[in-house]
Image: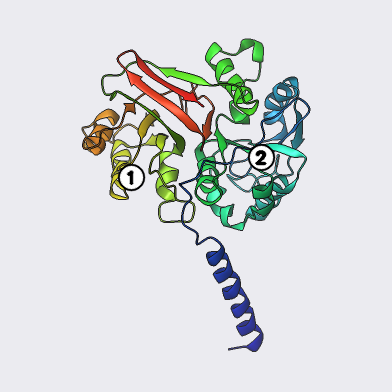
Amino acid sequence: MNRKHFLSSLAIAGSTMSTLKAWSNPAISSKDAVIPPYLRPGDTIGVTTPAGYMTMEEIQPAIQLMESWGFKIQIGSTIGKRDYCMGGTDAERVQDLQQMLDDPNIKAIMCARGGYGVIRIIDMLNFDRFKAKPKWIIGFSDITVLHCHLSSQLNIASIHSKMCNSFPKDWLLAEPIQIETILSIRQVLSGQPIKYKAVAQSYNRMGRVEAPLIGGNLSIIETLAGTVSDINTDGKILFVEDTGEYLYSIDRMFWNLKRSGKLAKLKGLVIGGFKVKPDDPGEEFGRTVYEVITEKIKEYGYPVCFDFPVGHQKNNFALKCGTKHILNVDANGSSLVSI
């Protein structure tokens, strides 16, 4: 072997081993999550695209509205960049997000949209400065990678919510549910009390529990299984949602949750929106989402809430991942209250 190439290989191997060693700690589960400082007027929110791309024009409604809330906005270098479906190359997205993680003047990071790409860069990010001075990371869908990683490796709370691509172009013409869900982002960022309700559902299972809330997009959670970003659900309220999946895929993913032990020691389960892809003719699965999920949890006794207002839908409210909540499910419906 060429000596130069041999030494280079050793360096890469050493770097890889150091990275694996650094991230070999088991998932954190026993301590309360660290809650980043809530925002005040004048604080700065950074906007970046760690996943899918967005143009400068497309993020303007979100920027204008957040500025009207009294926040300053720092536009990341990836806004307007594009590498096929992603908001810039991996290197560009890492550089932009890393800068925002490290900048002490940025108090929250709003991911412009979901899509795909965070899994490609999560292991390239350094969270040392972020851990020393935590800040809110905001988003959902593909951003579930960040929520899970913050939970499992850093035990730092984050915000699962709509992003810039969901802000209405004309606030005056927005539907009431759009307004309410977007305003919930400001409420959570500002530390205001949050209580969400869902109507009664025949598949619900009654009960009242208090526990940390964790979760996000189901397919992302399955993708992270067995990695350093895998979540520990023991003693937690788990919430899940998904979109564009066949029923058999949802069934498979819930079997993954069950077989990996993620359903066994929950305190509660919250099922958000599931936009199901129609079965192919002749390949019908023959079960509803409700039946798929109920089958996997029938042996457990914790409360379960279906049709909760979170997911790839208009009624997608902001949730604080990692912080304690009270889930109450009774004959009148369900409620989730942050405490």
Task: Give the percent coordinates (x, y) of residue 258.
Answer: 29, 45
Q: Measure how far apart labels 1 and 2 are at the Cα level.
A: 30 Å
Which amino acid is tagged 1?
Leu
Q: Are marks 1 and 2 in contact (CB under 8 Å)?
A: no
Q: Residue at x 51, y 35 (%)?
A: 323
Q: Secondary structure at mark 1?
A: helix
Task: Using a 10 Å C-alpha cutoff, classify the residue at mark 1 as few (fewer than 14 neighbours), some (14 to 19) or many (20 or more).
Answer: some
Q: Which residue is mark 1?
A: 257
322 or 119, which is in the foreground?
322
32 or 109, which is in the foreground?
32
* Residue 304: quadrant of the picture: top left
Q: Residue at x 78, y 40 (%)?
A: 105
Q: Residue at x 60, y 70 (%)?
A: 15
Which amino acid is tagged 2?
Lys
Is residue 311 visible in this depiction of the protein? no
167 or 269, which is in the foreground?
269
Which tag, 1 or 2, sits closer to the chain's start? Answer: 2
Q: Which quarter of the image is occupied by the N terminus?
A: bottom right
Task: Give the percent coordinates (x, y) of residue 178.
Answer: 56, 17
* Residue 179: quadrant of the picture: top right
In the image, residue 158 above or below residue 199: below
Q: In front: mark 1 or mark 2?
A: 2
* Residue 276: quadrant of the picture: top left
Q: Which residue is mark 2?
A: 135
Task: Using a 10 Å C-alpha cutoff, classify the residue at mark 2 as few (fewer than 14 neighbours), some (14 to 19) or many (20 or more).
Answer: many
* Apparent side of residue 142 relative to residue 208 in the rendered image (left or right): right
Task: Give the percent coordinates (x, y) of residue 238.
Answer: 40, 36
Is residue 28 visible in this depiction of the protein? yes
284 or 120, which is in the foreground?
120
Q: Residue at x 76, y 36 (%)?
A: 74
